Image (cartoon, helix red, strand yellow):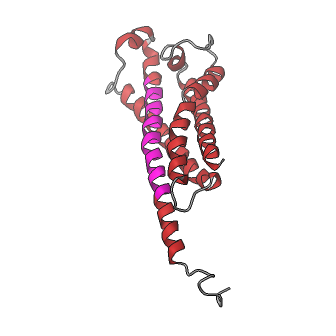
Amino acid sequence: MQSLGIVLMCVVAAVCYGIAHDQVTARVCVENFTVGHPPVFGTDDPTLLGLGWGIIATWWVGLLLGVPLAVVARAGSRPKRSVGSLVRPVGWLLAVMAVCAVLAGIAGWLLASAGAVFLVGPIARELPPDRHVPFLADLWAHSASYVVGLVGGIVVMVLVWWSRGQAAVAQDAEPSVAADPGRR
């Protein structure tokens, strides 16, 4: 049950992050969702688009983090990690993702405003020129979230596996009460 709990915690965390992230980016550039995404919802309301795309675009990311994290946290003979022990590392991952998304969005905005980056192709032709900069800011923020989530997810898994090894070493080093009945 702990393994399933880890997977569910990661899916819920990813969806909550995605909804919060998309509530912001839908207000920066609603066209990111109306032009840059397929028409799934038939609305241009930023709240509804942020909610819908926040779920659609992130549940699978949570699953891709949750399944291997559950394996790394629970498989084998090392001391196992519980769902509760993984809330903080996953929370830190989401916080780092959010900071990086904000910084990347600002960088995208500044670079697009300076003409250093620009839209090309069908989206550039479909969007009014005054919406290119906000669209690129959103694009950079979303890209940062995915890249940092991927790299950070791997880092979390490595740290969880390492912590289980450290716990095993500590367990092996601790004298057993059964081996020393006078130690109670």
Bounds of the magenta segment: 136-161
Q: Is 22 inside the magenta-drawn segment?
A: no
Q: Is 156 inside the magenta-drawn segment?
A: yes
Residue 14 image-quadrant placement? top right
Instruction: Tally the numbered discs.
Output: 0
* Point 43% across, 32% down: residue: 143
Q: Position of residue 38 (x, y in %)?
A: 51, 14
* Point 35% across, 27% down: residue: 114
The residue positioned farthest toward the front in the image shown: 179
For the C terminus, the image quarter is bottom right
Which residue is more in the foreground, 74 or 117? 74
Q: Position of residue 23 (x, y in %)?
A: 61, 29
* Point 54% across, 14% down: residue: 34
Position of 173 relative to 9 (above/below): below
The residue positioned farthest toward the right in the image shown: 184
The residue positioned farthest toward the left in the image shown: 116
Does 85 sit left or right of 29 as displayed? right
Does 91 sit left or right of 112 as displayed? right
* Point 60% across, 37% down: residue: 11
Name the magenta segment's main secondary structure.
helix
Position of 124 relative to 3 (above/below): above
